[in-house]
Image: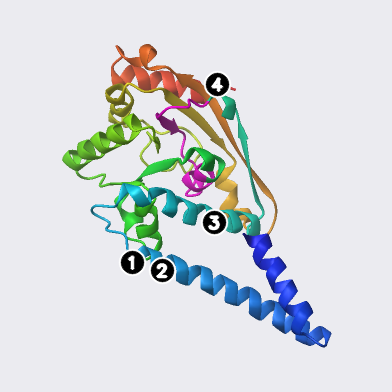
Amino acid sequence: MLYLYLALSLAVAAVFAHSILQGLLFFVGAFLGLLLLHVLVLALASLFVDKKNPNPKFFPFYRKLIILSVGPMLQAGRVRVELVGAEKLPASGFLLVGNHRSDFDPITAMWALRKRGLTFVTKKENVDIPVGGRIIVGSGCLSLDRSDDKQGLMVIRQAVRRIRAGDAIGIYPEGTRSKTGELLPFRVGCFKAAQWAKCPLVVLKVENSELVEKNFLRRKTTVRLTVKAVLPYDEIADMDTAEIGERVRNILLEA
């Protein structure tokens, strides 16, 4: 999308400009106008999202809006996302878990797994972001109030229903991003979603995402996402959540 906007801006400058200065002004004006139009489309689309009861029929539409926004942002920020092990991903619904190093983790994961329609369980505060919060809810992301255990159980049940319907749902067992890069203690209750949905558990390792904020626009950053393992339901069915958490932790700590 970014390259399309740049190409359209160049075309406007080439057609209407009669000097180098005019060309520069037309190019900048057209590019900023396209960006503004993009934002207006997002704002308008967000008005049709009920944050408390989003419509699953429109999930693909809002996911597409997110991808069309995330792609240009990553390109502009000189962020390259590398996905390793995509061939291991199940064709059916699954629960994805992994380490959490940056606010860019879900963004890069949704971009890398865009063909699979990956969405995440996200903290309630993200849903309150103007425009963007409604868009992520509209895409199928689930809002979690980390201070309310009862609501957390409801979210797990929502995730189970979605996974059984064939969706890919992601969650970070640490509950928050690690500022040191070391794995934080897991909130193991999230693994219940895989057991209740009787689905595979995908373990995704994230590397270098913590560098994105430091390097954004300034230098290239390659975020590496590796599908380390896919644990079949039969393998985790009789394990308690603490055991699953230990298994996932050991997988993520492998070189």
Looking at the image, is mark 4 or mark 2 nearer the viewer? 2
C-alpha separation, residue under disc 4 versus residue under disc 2: 43 Å
Circle 4 residue = 254
Q: Earlier in the sequence, mark 3 or mark 4?
A: 3
Where is 19 relative to 178, above or below?
Answer: below
Residue at 37% across, 17% down: 233
Please tell me which residue is depicted at 38% across the width and 32% down the height of the picture: 166
Q: Quadrant of the N terminus?
A: bottom right
The kind of secondary structure element at disc 3 is helix
Specify whether residue 217 is in view.
no
- Indicate yes or no whether the magenta region holds residue 94: yes
Q: Gap between marks 1 and 3, in whole Å?
A: 18 Å
Instruction: Indicate whether 79 appears above or below 184.
Output: below
Query: Disc 2 designates what residue?
Result: 43
**Residue that numbered label 3 is attached to:** 68
Residue 222 horizontal/vertical position (percent):
66, 44
Check whether the beta carbons of the residues at disc 2 and disc 1 lie within 8 A of each other. Answer: yes
What label does residue 104 carry, if any? none
Amino acid type indicated by mark 4: Glu
Q: Quadrant of residue 15?
A: bottom right
- At x 43%, y 27%, the residue is 92
Left or right of 149: which side holds 166? right
